[in-house]
Image: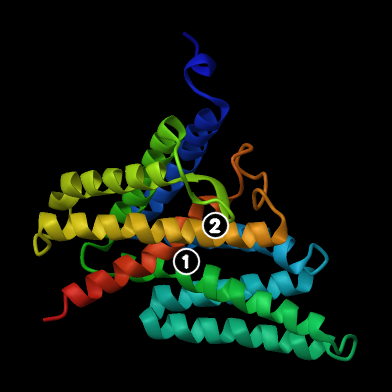
């Protein structure tokens, strides 16, 4: 039996995308080189911003996209080299660049369209720049590279479990107005996959964390990551979009692949921080 006969088009593209994305991500996680992780994650963030800008800011707003990418890199570098304080300072700079742009276009347009545009720009930084920059904060934590691998593994396997269980069992829809393809059975399948993943991988993490605590964290990641997925779906529905781009072999855009990760990174960071407080 050939590969196309065994796998559907969606399944095949899912595994091809993973094959392309996993090596550079794993390289950046396990190499103790700031330039490598900045290059990989910085490029991913810039591509997400391009998708965001095309769909929510307008293709013609090249200047605003340029400011957005500068702001993203400032937030990323602030988090990487100066921790949470640098992250906040970088984000402040990013928002300040938007204010600078606003002052530049005000003489041309004095209506609600300008407020709408800058609001979308600010949303992009709070959603993309701020959340994705938690990669660097998690990386700097105790056993940081393992925590990053863990959150990516749990999120990816949750998505895979939800996809396979939901597509086979089907049943009632989870939130049809936002995402018509997601089912309750898929959510349950994803949660079970996450808990099993946590149970099997807890020994890979610091010994201070019990199997039960990691299983609970894994369940929280499955639920919170699903909410992140639904949030991005709601944005796309509001804009009349199916995918953010066709960048990934007909399997959507990079932003589509990172929607759950974006929500889960801060959750893991705060979990680690609170657990390690003496």
Q: Is residue 184 left or right of residue 118?
A: left
Q: At which x and y percent is residue 76? A: 48, 72
- Circle 1 packing at 10 Å, graded few (<14), some (14-19), many (20+), is many
Q: Nearer the viewer, residue 118 or 242?
A: 242
Q: Are marks 2 and 1 in contact (CB under 8 Å)?
A: yes
Q: Nearer the viewer, residue 242 or 94?
A: 242
Q: At which x and y percent is residue 12? A: 52, 28
Q: Residue 116, relative to residue 233: is it above or below?
A: below
Q: Nearer the viewer, residue 118 or 174?
A: 174
| Label 1: which secondary element | helix
Task: For residue 135, say whether it is visible.
Answer: yes
> Mark 2 vs mark 1: which is more N-terminal?
2
Q: At which x and y percent is residue 271? A: 25, 70
Q: Residue 78, relative to residue 60: is it above or below?
A: below
Q: Is residue 102 left or right of residue 148?
A: right
Q: Nearer the viewer, residue 4 or 35?
A: 4
Quadrant containing the C terminus in the rendered view: bottom left
- Circle 2 packing at 10 Å, graded few (<14), some (14-19), many (20+), is some
- Residue at the spot of label 1: 132
Residue drawn at 65 percent across, 53 percent down: 244
Q: Residue 192, relative to residue 236: is it above or below?
A: above
Residue drawn at 45 percent across, 36 percent down: 170
Q: Quadrant of residue 269?
A: bottom left
Give the mark toward the camera: 2 or 1: 1
Task: For residue 43, say whether it is visible.
Answer: no
Q: Is residue 192 left or right of residue 235?
A: left
Q: At which x and y percent is residue 81? A: 40, 76
Mark 2 to mark 1: distance in Å?
9 Å
- Residue at the spot of label 2: 44
Q: Residue furthest right?
A: 108
Residue drawn at 66 percent across, 76 percent down: 121
């Amino acid at each position: 039996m050939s590969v196309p006969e065994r796998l559907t088009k969606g399944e095949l593209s899912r595994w091809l995308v993973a094959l392309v994305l996993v090596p550079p991500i794993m390289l950046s996680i396990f190499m103790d080189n700031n330039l490598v992780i900045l290059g990989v994650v910085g490029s991913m963030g810039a591509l997400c911003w391009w998708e965001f800008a095309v769909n929510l800011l307008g293709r013609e707003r090249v200047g605003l996209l340029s400011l957005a990418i500068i702001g993203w890199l400032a937030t990323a570098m602030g988090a990487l080299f100066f921790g949470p304080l640098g992250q906040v300072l970088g984000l402040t700079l990013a928002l300040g660049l938007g204010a600078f742009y606003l002052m530049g276009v005000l003489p041309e347009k004095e209506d609600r369209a300008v407020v709408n545009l800058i609001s979308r720009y600010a949303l992009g930084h709070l959603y993309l720049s701020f959340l994705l920059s938690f990669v660097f904060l998690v990386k700097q934590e105790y056993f940081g590279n393992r925590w990053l691998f863990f959150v990516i593994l749990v999120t990816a396997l949750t998505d895979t479990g939800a996809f396979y269980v939901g597509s086979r069992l089907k049943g009632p829809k989870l939130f049809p107005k936002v995402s018509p393809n997601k089912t309750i059975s898929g959510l349950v399948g994803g949660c079970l996959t996450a808990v099993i993943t946590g149970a099997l991988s807890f020994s890979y993490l610091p010994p201070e964390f019990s199997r039960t605590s990691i299983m609970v964290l894994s369940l929280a990641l499955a639920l919170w990551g699903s909410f992140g997925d639904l949030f991005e779906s709601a944005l796309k529905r509001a804009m009349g979009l199916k995918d953010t781009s066709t960048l990934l072999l007909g399997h959507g855009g990079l932003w589509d692949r990172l929607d759950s990760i974006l929500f889960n990174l801060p959750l893991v960071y705060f979990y680690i921080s609170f657990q390690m407080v003496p």
